[in-house]
Every structure is written in structure tokens, then in C-alpha cells.
Amino acid sequence: MHPTNMSDIACKRIEKAPSKVGGRRYQRPATSDDPAGSPDKDAVRLSSQTLRSSANSFAIMPSHTSKELLAALLKTTEADIIPLTREGVTSGSKVFGAAILSAASLAPYTVATNDERTSPLLHGEINCIQKFYTVSHPDPASRPSPGDDCVFFATHEPCSLCLSGITWSGFKELYFLFTYEDSRDRFAIPYDLEILEEVFRVKAEGETDAALSRRALYNRSNKFFEARSLGDLVEDLEDAAEREHWAAEVERVKALYDGLSKTYQEGKKSGAATSSTWK
């Protein structure tokens, strides 16, 4: 049976939700009354340089070790996201995809990709969130908690629309494969950066252009979520041989996107149908 629209193709349900695992990944910052903070006993501590939380926010504790996360996220990309992306780019949609995974097992709950053929708002992350709520887990009573039970993964660093969708949905642990610069330079899709710069970055009084250009476009560590690239996870690894191995694996999986990007760009040149204004 054929789906009624491309959004049905751009998503698949992977596994049922396990029982709730609790809010074990959050820790209040240290205070004078509690210098060590208040981590749950099952929390895995992030290295000190990555706990960059303001005095009135939470430090998001990772669900697993960096090595475990790398293995699971790269496997999900290659086995689940890329096959859907291959279908999407042949129909005129961009190469962006996402997955929502179990924080307990790192098995994917929901995987989806960009479906701008149907709507310009159906970015990979937004499509994935929508399917998580309406297809994979429509019952609120049994749905995994986005903040407590889930890890969010995006193949490309989320744009302003998707960052807002992730935040409003309550996902707190966020990882991505490609950076904004990769999207612009490797995929010839500059709009994530351009929209952040043109719409959201406001020059302060007396601020120079050079200072403005050095300012981060968003806070990767904030009261709502902690965002890290897979490159950051590789740098976490203490063993040099492991760092070399996983850096090579990241590059291997990245290279799988070169052909997908070529297909998308060729379709764009030939006038593939799409609802997106910014191609």
C-alpha cells in the first residue's frame, strides 16, 4: 500500500517505549549549600569542561558514555536515517534527518527525514518530533518522556526552527553529526546560518563587526538542553587509539552523505517539485 504523502515515507516507527526510567540525567549546579550538586546516583557525569551551566539552570547529564553514544548514533544514521534520506532526496527533499532514541537502550523510537515536498516546515527534526507524538507514541499515558527517557539526534546541527521545536518538546540531550558550516560548505545549504545571523543576531551598541562575528549564534549549553556534536564526543575519549578509530568512523559515515547531496542538488537544478522557498 502506498503512503498518501511523502511525510509517511519520511518516518518509521522503530520500537515500543520501555517503562519510565526517571529523570536521572539532570543535576542542579553546585551551590554553597550543596557544593557537589545533587546528581541522581545513576547519572553519568560529563567531563568538567562540558558542564557549562549558569547559576540558575540545569547541567544535563549524558545518558551514556561518549563511546556508547558514538556507536549508537552512527549505527542509527547508517541503518535507519540514510535509507529514508535516499528516498527523500529523490523526491526533492533535503538531506536532513533525525532520530529520537531511548535513553536507556539507545535504540531508536522514531526516525524521520526532511519532507519539504509536503511542507516547508517539515524539517527532519520537526517531522521526527511530529511522528514521535502522533505515530510512534500517540498515547500520552505511555509515551516516553522527552526529557527523562529520550536522546535527540539530528544529522545536521538544528536550525532556529528545529532548535525551538526541540526545546518546546522538552528534549534535553541533543547530538548532531554535521555543523552549520558543513551544511553551508559541504551541502551548499547556507540558510541555517543565514537565518540565525540575519534574523536573530542583534548587534549591541558599540559592538564591532569583528566582535559580532565571533559571538555564538545560540547557547549549546542552556537551561533547556545540552547540544554536542559527534566531534565533541570523539574529543572526550581519553585513549588516542580510540579517538583515531571513532574519528575515522565519523568521517566514514559523513562520506555516505556525499552521494545523497549530489542527488538533491541535481534534482534542484532539474526543477524537482518542492514546497520550500529556500532550496
Image (cartoon, grey):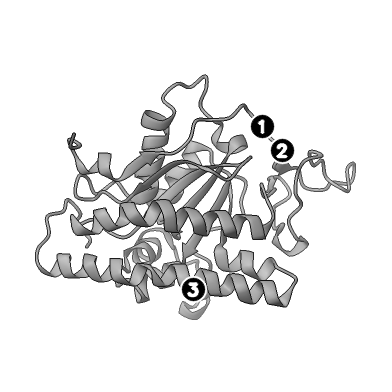
Cα–Cα span, label 2 and label 3: 32 Å
Residue 24: give its label.
2
Cα–Cα span, label 1 and label 2: 8 Å
Amino acid carrying mark 1 in the image: Val
Amino acid carrying mark 2 in the image: Arg
In which quadrant will I find the C terminus? bottom left
Q: Secondary structure at mark 3?
A: helix
Picture coordinates of residue 158, whole percent (x, y): 43, 56
Q: Secondary structure at mark 2?
A: loop
Picture coordinates of residue 254, whole percent (x, y): 43, 69
Rate crowding at label 3 as few (under 14), some (14 to 19) or many (20 or more) other CA atoms within 10 Å. Answer: few
Does any portion of residue 277 appear in the rendered image? no
Label 3 vs 1, first from the N-terminus: 1
Give the residue furthest to the left: 271
Rate crowding at label 2 as few (under 14), some (14 to 19) or many (20 or more) other CA atoms within 10 Å. Answer: some
Cα–Cα span, label 3 and label 1: 33 Å
Tell me the residue that label 1 is attached to: 21
Picture coordinates of residue 66, whole percent (x, y): 66, 59
Q: Residue at x 58, y 44 (%)?
A: 172
Q: Residue at x 54, y 43 (%)?
A: 107
Asked if residue 169 is positioned above or below residue 31 in the image, the reply reads above
Q: Secondary structure at mark 1?
A: loop
Label 2 vs 3, first from the N-terminus: 2
Q: Residue at x 74, y 73 (%)?
A: 239
Determine whether label 1 and label 2 are within 8 Å by CB.
yes
Does any portion of residue 121 appear in the rendered image? yes
Tell me the residue that label 3 is attached to: 251
